[in-house]
Image: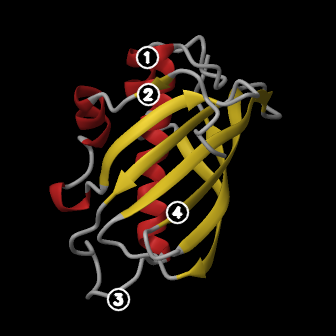
Amino acid sequence: MTLSSIAQQHPTDEDLLSRVLAPYKDHCKYLRSAIVSENEAGRAVARCEFAIPDSCYIDDTGHLNSVEVNICYNQMMYYLVAKSVKEGLGTGFESWTLDDFWKHQLPDILIARFTATFRRPVNPRAFWGEMEFRSVTRRARTNGTAFLAAETAFRYGDADAGRCNGEAVLAIVNVA
C-alpha cells in the first residue's frame, strides 16, 4: 500500500476536501491533505496527512486512540471515494457521479467490520495515513436489493515510528 511506484497522482483538491468534511464539526476535521492514485493492481489508494490538535471527546491521551482512528478512517475513506469518482479511478464506483457520492455519503456507506492493531503509539498532532480499496463487488441481499461490498486496508504512522494498521469492510446500500 505505497504510492512510491505509482505514475499518476492526484493532489489534494481543497474544494472537494472541504465538501467531504462538511458534515463534521469544525473541531473534528482531522484530514488535512490527501494524494490519491491507482496502484499497480488498478486499485485506488490515498496517502493522507492528519492533525488532531485536541481530541473531540476525551482529555489528551498523548497518542492516537481507537475512536480517532475510526474518525480518521471515515474522513480518508470518504475523500478517497469522492476523489476516485471525480477522477474516474478504478475503485468499483465507476458508474457514480459526484452527485451519487453526496447522496450516499452519510446514510448509505456503512462500516460492516472494522479492526485496528496498534504496534506503537502514534502522535495525534501530526501523522500520516494510507488507505486502499482491495475490492469492491456488487452483491444482492436475499430480498434482491443490491449493495456494494468493499474491502479496504489502512495504516497510520508518524515521524517517531508510531504504527497502527487495520482493515475495514464497507457495505454501500441503496445502490441502483
Q: Which mark is residue 156?
A: 4
The spot of residue 88 in percent (x, y) is 54, 13
- The answer to whether residue 121 is above or below residue 5 is below
Of mark 4 and mark 1, the one earlier in the sequence is 1
Mark 3 vs mark 4: in front: 4
The residue lying toward the viewer, choosing from 36 and 54, is 36
**Tag 2: amino acid:** Ala
Q: Which mark is residue 82?
A: 2
Callout 4: SS: strand
Q: Which mark is residue 42?
A: none
Callout 2: SS: helix
- The answer to whether residue 10 is above or below residue 95 is below
| Residue on which disc 3 sits | 61
Q: Residues within 10 Å of mark 2 (few under 14, many from 20)?
A: many
**Tag 3: amino acid:** Thr
Of mark 3 and mark 4, the one earlier in the sequence is 3
Q: Residues within 10 Å of mark 3 (few under 14, many from 20)?
A: few
Q: Residues within 10 Å of mark 1 (few under 14, many from 20)?
A: some
The spot of residue 71 in percent (x, y) is 41, 60
Of mark 1 and mark 3, the one earlier in the sequence is 3
**Tag 4: amino acid:** Tyr
Are discs 2 and 1 less than 8 Å apart at CB?
yes
Q: Residue at x 18, y 62 (%)?
A: 27
The spot of residue 59 in percent (x, y) is 26, 88
Mark 4 vs mark 1: in front: 4
Cα distance between the residues tagged 4 and 1: 25 Å
| Residue on which disc 1 sits | 86
How many numbered circles are shown?
4
Quadrant of res 158: bottom left
Are discs 2 and 3 less than 8 Å apart at CB?
no
